[in-house]
C-alpha cells in the first residue's frame, strides 16, 4: 500500500534501490500528448547521482525505457510504463547493517512493520525511488507546458546560508552552478559549506523553494483535498523532508491581518491581488497568483562516522557509515520537488475539467 499517488493523473512506482530496476506506471494521462523522450531524459539527468563533487558518487545513467502507453511518440490514453535499470549497485556496502538499525533511517520502522526488509541501500525506502517520480513528473510537465504552467525550484538555503528572496533573483540561472542556487555569491558559500561538511565526514540539510507560475484560478478540491494540502502531502512524501510551508508560512504569524490580507484589484480582464501572502491559494483553491512554497530537508542520515545503535535482537552495536551518499541532498532534490509539484497540479488540472459544465 502507499505506492500510488493521484486521482485522475495517477502514478504507481515500483522497484528497490539495489533491485534490477525501478519504474513508474502512469494512469490517466490524456491521449495525444507528445511524449518528448529527450525532455524526460534531461529531467532524470538533473536528479541522477554522480553529477558533481557535492553529490553521491554512485554512477547511474538513469536511462529509461517506455514499455507501454506511447505509440509513434504520442500517449495513447493507456497506462504509460517507464522502467529505469539499476546499473551501479554495491550491495556488499550494506552487509554490515543486515541486522543493525542505522540511526534516523527507515531500517527499524520497516522491520517492525513488515518483519522483513531489504537492507541493500534501504530497499524501497531509498531515495533512489524518486527517479521514478521524476520520470512521471516529466510527463506531467509536458502536459502542463501546453497550458503554459511553469514550475521552477531552486536551493534557497543550506545550513544557515540563505539566498535572497526569489523575487530578486533570475530563476533561469538555477542550473548555472552545481548547488542549484540562482544567486552566484550565495551559491559559492553553499558549495564551500557542503565541501567542508563532506571533508568532515558529515552531512547538512537545507531548503528547496518552488515557484509555480500561470496556474489558472480554480484548482483545488475543498474540503479535504485543498490544493495546498495536496502540495504539502506530495512534498512530505519525499525522502528526508521534515517541513513544508507555503505563502507567508510561519513568518506570517508575526503579521497583523491588516498587513497580511491580499487586497483584490482589477487588472484588465483579470482579478489580481496586490500582495501574495496567500501563496496563490485561498480557501484551498488557486486564485491565479504565483504559488510558492518551501520544503525543508534534514541532513542525510548516513554519515561516515561511527554511531551507536542496536540490532534486531536488541543488542548494542556500533554502526559505521559506508557506501556512497550525498553530503547534502538539496541540489539533487530540486527536480524531485518540481516533479511532485507537477504531478499535483496536473491531477488538479484534470479534476477541474469535471467541476462545471
Image (tube, helix red, strand yellow):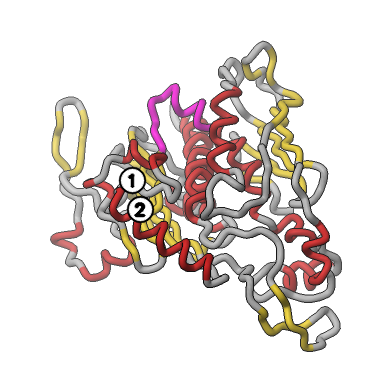
Question: In the rendered structure, which segment of residues is drawn in magenta?
Answer: 140-151
In the picture provided, is 203 more to the left or to the right than 313?
left
Residue at the spot 50% in from the left edge and 53% down from the top edge: 224
The x and y percentages for residue 356 are 44, 29
The residue pinned by badge 1 equals 182
Q: Within 10 Å of the Cα at label 1, are there few (<14), some (14-19), or many (20+) other Cα atoms? A: many
Kind of element beneath mark 2: helix
Residue at the far bottom in the pictured view: 316
Q: Marks 1 and 2: in contact by CB < 8 Å?
A: yes
For disc 2, the marked residue is: 187
Question: Which x, y percent locates residue 340?
Answer: 53, 44
Observer-side mark, 2 or 1, equals: 2
The one of 49 and 38 positioned closer to us in this rendering: 49
Residue at (47% x, 38% y) in the render = 345
Residue positioned 78% across, 54% down in the render = 90
| 156 within the magenta span | no
Q: In which quarter of the image is residue 303?
A: bottom right
User: Which mark is drawn over residue 309?
Assistant: none
Q: Marks 2 and 1, how far apart in space?
A: 7 Å
Work out which quarter of the rendered image holds the C terminus and state it. Answer: top left
Amino acid at each position: 500500500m502507499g505506492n500510488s499517488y493521484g486521482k485522475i493523473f495517477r502514478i504507481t512506482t515500483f522497484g528497490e534501490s539495489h533491485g534490477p530496476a525501478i519504474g513508474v506506471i502512469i494512469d490517466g494521462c490524456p491521449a495525444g500528448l507528445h511524449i518528448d523522450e529527450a525532455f524526460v531524459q534531461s529531467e532524470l539527468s538533473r536528479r541522477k547521482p554522480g553529477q558533481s563533487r557535492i553529490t553521491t558518487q554512485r554512477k547511474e545513467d538513469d536511462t529509461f525505457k517506455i514499455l507501454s502507453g506511447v505509440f509513434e511518440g504520442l500517449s495513447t490514453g493507456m497506462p504509460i510504463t517507464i522502467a529505469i535499470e539499476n546499473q551501479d549497485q554495491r550491495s556488499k556496502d550494506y552487509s554490515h547493517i543486515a541486522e543493525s538499525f542505522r540511526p534516523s533511517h527507515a531500517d527499524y520502522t520497516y522491520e517492525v512493520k513488515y518483519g522483513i526488509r531489504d537492507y541493500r541501500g534501504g530497499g524501497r525506502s531509498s531515495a533512489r525511488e524518486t527517479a521514478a517520480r521524476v520520470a512521471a513528473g516529466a510527463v506531467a510537465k509536458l502536459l502542463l507546458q501546453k497550458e503554459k504552467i511553469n514550475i521552477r525550484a531552486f536551493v534557497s538555503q543550506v545550513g544557515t546560508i540563505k539566498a535572497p528572496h526569489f523575487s530578486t533573483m533570475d530563476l533561469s540561472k538555477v542550473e548555472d552552478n552545481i548547488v542549484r542556487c540562482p544567486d552566484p555569491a550565495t551559491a559559492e558559500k553553499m558549495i564551500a559549506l557542503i565541501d567542508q561538511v563532506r571533508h568532515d565526514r558529515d552531512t547538512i540539510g537545507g531548503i528547496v523553494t518552488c515557484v509555480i507560475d500561470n496556474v489558472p484560478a480554480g484548482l483545488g478540491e475543498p474540503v479535504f483535498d485543498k490544493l495546498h494540502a495536496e502540495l504539502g502531502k506530495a512534498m512530505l512524501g519525499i525522502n528526508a523532508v521534515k517541513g513544508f510551508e507555503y505563502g507567508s508560512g510561519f513568518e506570517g504569524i508575526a503579521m497583523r491581518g491588516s498587513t497580511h490580507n491580499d487586497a483584490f484589484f482589477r487588472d484588465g480582464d483579470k482579478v489580481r491581488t496586490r500582495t501574495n501572502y496567500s501563496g496563490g491559494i485561498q480557501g484551498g483553491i488557486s486564485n491565479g497568483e504565483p504559488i510558492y512554497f518551501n520544503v525543508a530537508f534534514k541532513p542525510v542520515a548516513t554519515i561516515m562516522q561511527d554511531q551507536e545503535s542496536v540490532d534486531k535482537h536488541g543488542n548494542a552495536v556500533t554502526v559505521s557509515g559506508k557506501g556512497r551518499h550525498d553530503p547534502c541532498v538539496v541540489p539533487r532534490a530540486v527536480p524531485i520537488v518540481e516533479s511532485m509539484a507537477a504531478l499535483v497540479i496536473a491531477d488538479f488540472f484534470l479534476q477541474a475539467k469535471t467541476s462545471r459544465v
